[in-house]
Image (cartoon, helix red, strand yellow):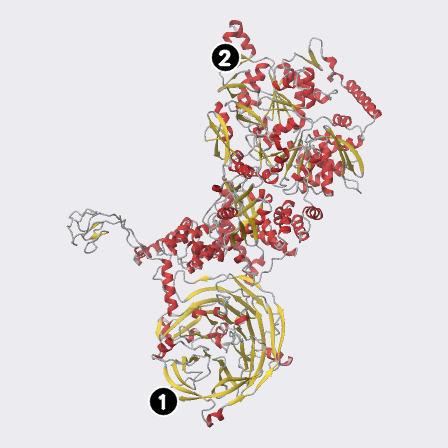
Amino acid sequence: MPTIFQTSANQALRRVRQIQRVLLDGHMRWHSSNIKQDGYINIGDVSIKVKTPKRPELVPRKYVPSDIPQSTLKHLRWVMQKDVLGQDVFLLGPPGPLRRTIAMMYLELTQREAEYISLSRDTTETDLKQRREIRSGTAYYIDQCAVNAAIQGRVLVLEGIEKAERNVLPVLNNLLENREMQLDDGRFLMAAHRYDKLLQDHTVEELNAWKLVRVDESFRVIALGLPVPRYQGNPLDPPLRSRFQARDVSPAPFKEQLELLQEVGNNIPQERLSQLLSFASTMLTTESTSLGLPDFPIYSLQALVKIMNQVPNVPTADLITRLYPYETILGKEGKTAVTDILKKFELDHSPSRGIRDHIADIQIEGAEGLVSVVCAGQHHHIQVPVGCKQTIDTSEFVETDYHNELLQNMMLSHSVKDFCIIGPKGSGKSAVVKTFADRLNYEIEPIMLYQDMTSRDLLQQRSTQTSGDTYWRPSPLITAAVEGKLAVLDGIHRINPGTVAVLHRLIHDRELTLFNGTRLLRHDKYDDIKDSEQLSDDDMTTRSILRIHPSFRIVGLAEPPKVGSSSGQWLNPELLSMFLYHPMRPLSTQEEQHVINKLIPDVPEIETLLQLSHKLLSSTDATLQSIATSLSTRQMLRIARRRAAYPSESLYDAVHKACLSRFLPRLARTALEQALSNSDIEKPCIDSSIDQIQMSVTCEIKHEVLRIGKTEVNIHTPDNQMKVPDVLFYDNPQHLSVMESMLKDFLLGEHLLLVGNQGVGKNKIVDRFLYLLNRPREYLQLHRDTTVQTLTLQPTVENGVIIYEDSPLVRAVKLGHVLVVDEADKAPTHVTCILKTLVESGEMHLSDGRKIITHKQGQDQGQDVTSNMIVSHPDFRMIVLANRPGFPFLGNDFFGAMGDIFSCHAVDNPNIDSEMSMLKQYGPDVPEHILRKLVLAFGELRNMADQGLLSYPYSTREVVNMVKHLQQFPEEGISSVVRNVFDFDSYNKEMQDTIVKTLHKHGIPIGARPTNIDLAKVYDLPKPELVSHWHVSSPGTGTQNRTALFNCPVEEKPLNIKGPVRMPIESFPLDRHESRALRFSEEQAYWMIPMSENNVIADVAVTKAQAHSSQTDDIIHIAAAKPIALYTMNPHGQYINYMDLYDVFPTMSSTFKPRLKLAPLGASVYNSVVLHEEMTNMILTINTETGDLTRFDTSTLIETAIDKFTRRFQTSDSGQGYYKMCREMAHTPEGLLVFYKVNEQSLEVINMLEGRAHSISVPFNVASVHLVDLKKWLIQDAQTQRRYLLEKTSQLGEVPNYQLLPIEEDVLNDKVPIHGKIDMATTSRLDESTLNSALSQDVSSPNRIVTTRGVYAGILEGFPDLQDTSVYSIPREPLSEQSTNWKDPLRHLAVKPVTGNVEATVTSLPESGQIVRALSTWQVPKKVFPNEVKPMNLSGYLEVADLANHKLRYIPVPGPASSSPYNSWLLSITDVNMVMSSMSNDGLVTVDSGGCVRLWETSIGNLTRSLGQWRNMIGGDPGKLQVTYQRDSGKEATLPKHGKVDSTNDPHVGGDTWAGGTGGRSTAGLGGKGGPYRLDAGHDVHQLSDAEKEAVPEHIKRAAREMGQKAFKERLREINMSEYDADLYESYASNVRKQVQSLRVILDSLQAKGKERQWLKNQTYGDLDDSRLIEGLTGEKAIYKRRGEQEPEMGSPQQLPKKLKLVVDVSGSMYRFNGHDGRLDRQMESVVMAMEAFEGYENKFQYEVIGHSGEMYDVSFTQQNAAPKKQQRQT
């Protein structure tokens, strides 16, 4: 504290300075002695008479200091000159209080009464002239400031001229020029000299009768404004400008300002003040302004000096950032410039701090508090104002060192000035302010600011009393000022700067003039008037003067400006001069962890979550920074609370839920996934055993307890059961999972936000949720016209009185209902943001003056709760529904603005299973395959919408409507029903093509005709002939046969198992395409597997559905080589699992040619498959779900390293020395596999289930082994081709016994037996009916089918169970080993596949009795090809031999899209370019060498059923339609008759007379009863059917096509473009059609958003503005609002087209290496994409294409303003 000696010294110093100024410039000084005795005042050589004011309280006070600076005296002298001349003045200058202070000083010096008005964009003519008020039911005109000043001779002070809208101020033009004005009440203001002249000839009564009013000659106008265009605002209207005399009020000279600062900071060294002032002056120089730096608020330096005077060791640099937060508002260059200036004046250094600044102690006595603060390790005492709150809130606030330092800084600012906290949302601004208020006993008055808030909303609002009289109701800000509260202005960044300007005088001078004329004065000014005029408080109130409480303070809350953006720069020079600013950063990791641990201890994995959050926040990637805003401290606490309550939940899911990642752009979602992975937050592993957890979510109510999933809650008992919603809702797992998550947050007391696309069921989920909870609902739907007033109250007029009806929001708060706010994204965010205080603090101000307070506040106040308070019910909760942000919803980003104050839940369209479950309930009779097609098609359309390829996100709602239609009208085809949804897009060709392509992909035959059938041609199959008999030797049939028997030596072998080793599994999307979209054929569907360019398909096998009970679909396994890999997929699933086995099979040489074979296992190991590599004899079992890999070795199968090494270099052409695997019995419970070495005499048997193996020796070289039964195997001798039956007869201990039974064949005369190597033998018998049909006789016996290259099939009747077998053969011409007409052998090599599996080219379909063989094109009979022209682009043909129907078909298989260069491997093994396998239900799968998987249906029965379903989907033509009326004639039918014939053929209805009538009886006609027959007289409406449209003659169609070609060529000629150029351009454009469409969708969204119109208020026509109802009652005209194009505010950035520059590489390397990697083609496609996409958006984007060749960097192809619009120029 300053001592008495210091105070005396300072006073002496001031006197010396005053003497110096008098000596230096004596003629410009002012002193009280200059006031002459006759009432004159002099400033220099200018004097003016001082009159005694009529109303002294209107004279400004305490503006004139004891020592007026010379620069100010000069301004005052000039104003006095203009006053003497009777001229109005305009003081303009930079933002700050100086201009207003000079005006008020002059008025105080001259004792002039003032009428003050702060202009804003909301100021209207009535605020200046006259306003109507209703008194006792009658409307009276009340004079406003301009009229009062003119009549009473006062000075009208107009501040903020540049903020008033155009055509408002010109109403004063005549008053300024001629001192005349016509008033609305009929009076006329007349200049004094004219009035006095009339008074010479007329009496006062006559002039009053003429409604003439004298304008006092002392009336003057002082206008205050900013120079425009340097600052934002409207420029002066020329007629208005010409009526003023201008004066530039610039800052005082350096010396004067330094002296003033020295007076304020008498404890501060002059050098330090000089440095501070030098810095401020430098920031105001022209050089600093040219850098784009905002004006430094030099007039606020006194506040900093006051702080420095109390706390001398506070760092100057820290104080400067409070006055000028350059690190928050400036970009990199601006920060650097300010930092350099700070360094120049040695202000940049901050002392090292051993102890962080904090508040040591607070002592409160009365209205003042003594605060002990620690700054830089030293204690200081400062006096601060304190509040008047009686009760102390004990809310929990966790302090950190940073918070303590921030609170100490806030306390220093609070001691001298109002302050504002700038920080990102969720950083704790509100919590810190609440703690600050609690420590100083302040009662907080929260005031939520919003964009369209008016000055009336901020200060005063008009209302009506119960009598209908109008009155002005003070706003919460005015109440806070009078009662000494802490007014918290939340959202300064949102409010319009022109609106907040009305607070300048309140903040700078603590004075305010309200709309009704009431004046608020600073407490000392109020007390001075009261004492000098000897008035009481009631007298002051009567004179409309209110005292501002000395404790009143304003605290602002705002989010940081958007640095570098043309919008969002709210912190302008005017606002800089209003507050001291405290930037608030997000908490550090340690600080945030400290806060969370204190509030919610023992939260699992919270450290990991915090590290992720701060990694995102500190990232330089803008995408990651945008995601970080969703993980604010508030959101972290919410996650921690939920994790503490439900610790089993996944942190991965919690982060995705908080970030609403489902609706993030793909790039942002990928970045988030990467960030999670880097932070070791992995997606929870869900294996197949618990993959159905979501499917198991159920809901039940038992004993008044609701259970959703595993979460339970007691049922609520409401007072009003009528408001509990009850809707039709079908439970499905996905929606129940969402509701369970909602319930968890609901139990934690959270308000909920549901975000999703349209039609996903948000409303139904909420209604069902509330129904289950038995909670009453209040519903509020928002829209673009929703205002803050309509959100809270609905004003109506009853008997001339404004009545405010509670909105659903207020009712829900009162009654404890759940408020459902629907379509929250449609309302502007500045409207919905007022919900923030209600959700966050439980408080809200209503427009009728009432205030919502929390339930706890209501309990604390008890009886003190007034009628203006609404106590929130403890059961009140809010559920907000919003569409996802972005196109095409065109809504506002509600989640981005307010998402962190809600617990967010993403509601997506149901997954496939959930949507199927729901649709089955809507359409129980609709076939399941149709439902699945709809679900899959719409799922893909939604994905395309997410990717930006479609603009409309198709929802479940549309699918439900289609299913309802199909349920009600089952005869209508799905291809016509889908048009109910897609006809909206029928006029957008690109959109329509995409939709039709997607529908066709999923088998919805839109556009197909029932005649589009493309089945293979049927040929006759030769009937089977009995060619021989087989006799199987067996024990007991004779000595000769017994000697032929051979007991095979069997040896138990150890089975070495290595592993398991877990291999990584990658998943790729399975992009299935249904093949029966436009045409019906045997092919059902196809898709591609993700192969590298070197991969070669080796084998395919199927785990069939009947092999186990838990899997309802087949599982397809595909083996590939080079490198060796395994693909596994469910044909009806969504993903392909890929396992790379390169590490298991390292490729040692390019000559190594692997031969792979797959064997799916069954029973308990159905999820495993055996992979056998025949060259190295490696046997692997692979679990396709977990990736576990196990290797099996037997002692006989293990080779030396040298053998295996040489085998890798051995070719397979000879077919020698490799192992074969028999997999026919792998699916059995035993998992039986038999291995043999070709041309050797041993078999190896492995029981996969038991893990045992043994070897069998046979007395001949084995050619082939076929397991025709579990215990009987057909073996063929490699040398003699003789066949044997190896039978397992007994099990001796652990080693089984095998007998080798020779098979003798008796060939019938003239018959050709089945000879050669057996390719395939079936393991199951044909059923009896199929066998009888095949043999054309009644037979019931065991049977098998075998195939060789010389027969279609051989039927073994009686084999293998009977000793005698009848062999029936269906012979064919032997298949060619190679093509006879293929000329180019190298081309022949190129198409050869790598497969050593002959079995993979022939298979049997036992249920339908078909044998299917894959053939190459040259192996197909010539009769199949019309005109003997063989198609080239085919993988081959499927030869289907139907034994039961004796038919033969050849089905073409499309060729591969690409082939591997290694397809020439193992050329001699097979001739066909694909592999295949049978599936359950006689299905078939093929895989070509390009990796295309195709599903086939060949069974006649299955094809017939599928064709019927396909035709039903198309639907039939309803034919000719007619309108039929059904009625009851009330008469009985008589004997039938033809009836009379009407020669005029008029229509007849009823009557029993005329033939051809309708609705009659007994006569021939239609729609009647009892007639002999139907007779149509032609009285129906006719229309063209689709069939008629298709029946257009071919020559007409041809002429139409020719006309189109002619028009196309004419178009090319017009644009000077050749057909070659057109083809060249199209070759590039066609490759980027999808990307162009996606980009145009994005551009469309920008267009639509930019064209949205705004509300224009204060209009004379349009829609009635609810906020101006009282003005309407009083008779004002401008009470309407209407939509229109909002004119940009003056000074705002001009909206010009975005300019883009496409830089392309035109160096020689582009075309040199184009043939190698296609780089030039890709660049051309990119440029074409840009030109095509930007076409039509020239008003939004301007682009130019520039080339860089390495030597030249500006090769211009297009100009900025001349984008090529024709394809010729684009080419």
Question: Residue 984: x percent and y percent?
Answer: 41, 48
The residue indicated by pointer 2 is: 211
**Quarter of the N terminus within the rendering:** top right
Q: Residue at x 45, y 59 (%)?
A: 932
Q: Is residue 840 left or right of residue 336?
A: left
Question: Residue 691: x percent and y percent?
Answer: 55, 61
Q: Is 1377 above or below relative to 226?
A: below
Q: Residue at x 58, y 57 (%)?
A: 1708
Q: Is residue 439 left or right of residue 651?
A: right
Q: Name the kind of residue labelled 2 in the image.
A: Lys
Q: Is 1389 above or below relative to 1580?
A: below
Question: Residue 1162: x percent and y percent?
Answer: 52, 72
> Element type at marker 1?
loop
The disc label shown at residue 1058, or none: none
The answer to which of 497 and 5 lies nearer the viewer is 5
Q: Is 1173 above or below relative to 1611?
A: below
Q: Name the kind of residue labelled 1 in the image.
A: Asn
Res 930 → quadrant: bottom left
Residue farthest along the front direction in this orientation = 703
Q: Residues within 10 Å of mark 1 (few under 14, many from 20)?
A: few
Res 1059 → quadrant: bottom right
Q: Is residue 27 left or right of residue 769?
A: right
- Residue 1678 can be seen, yes or no: no
The residue indicated by pointer 1 is: 1309
The answer to which of 724 and 1546 lies nearer the viewer is 724
> Element type at marker 2?
loop
Q: Is 662 above or below relative to 228?
A: below
The answer to which of 1342 and 1743 lies nearer the viewer is 1342
